[in-house]
Amino acid sequence: MDGMAIEWVGAAALAVLTGWQGYLFGGRQERHKERRARDLTVATELVAPLRELQRLLRWFGREKTSKDEVASAFLAWSAAFDKHGHRLPRQWQHVDRSVRAAAGTVFGGISLVHIRPESNRMDLGEPDAMWQDYADDYLGYVARCILNWGDTARDVPKVVANYDVWLVQTERREPFGQNRSGSGDHASHEG
């Protein structure tokens, strides 16, 4: 009877252990699935205002663009980033500033409307096809990175370059401290 009791206790322990492992594994899978769904939702909600800023950048100078439209787009981006930015990788926390730097190069001080509400009265910058193209490309780059992060099945870049670094990496601006002659003068930032 002792041998049978030992077998019974062993079988019961094995059953409990197997059930516990299944519970843990299933719980882990469920949490992973929930995190992926949440990340995809966050990515989608962050990218929507980026796409609106891109639309405005593309049509600025070709169709009438009001200060209210631009201010609204920047406020929508701010609200989305305030709500979800903390979920992005820590190294990406500059993305809010970089998006403002890129689009602000084109639209001007109105890009700070989330901090200074009176900036919505400022005139928009003058259309500049080159800087509009740069800003549009940068916002597209950021949107792709965020969407890839939201769909964790894809390779996600560890770092999203800030706007100034991206301009240099894509050879749209020379690094600070150099010019084409190599004399060490600062590169100009024409706008």
Image (cartoon, rainbow, N blue to C red):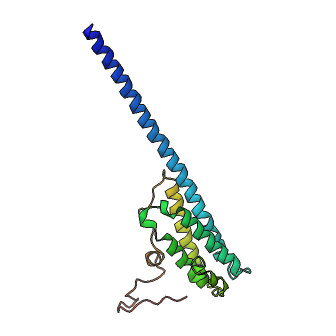
Look at the picture and state if 30 lies above or below 106.
above
Nearer to me, 154 or 33: 33
Q: Quadrant of the C terminus?
A: bottom right
Residue farthest along the right direction in this orientation: 64
Look at the picture and state if 164 lies above or below 179.
above
Look at the picture and state if 175 lies above or below 37.
below
Please report the residue visible at 46 percent of the width from the left and 40 percent of the height from the top. Answer: 29
Residue 59 falls left or right of residue 108: right
x and y percent of residue 49 in the render?
62, 67
Residue farthest along the left direction in this orientation: 2
x and y percent of residue 79 in the render?
59, 67
Q: Give residue 106's quadrant in the image.
A: bottom right
Nearer to me, 59 or 182: 59
Q: Quadrant of the N terminus?
A: top left
Nearer to me, 31 or 165: 31
Q: Give residue 120's quadrant in the image.
A: bottom right
Confirm whether residue 159 shows in the render: no
Residue 140 falls left or right of residue 66: left
Please report the residue visible at 46 percent of the width from the left and 82 percent of the height from the top. Answer: 173
Q: Give residue 70's quadrant in the image.
A: bottom right
x and y percent of residue 21 in the render?
39, 32
Nearer to me, 35 or 3: 3
Confirm whether residue 172 shows in the render: yes
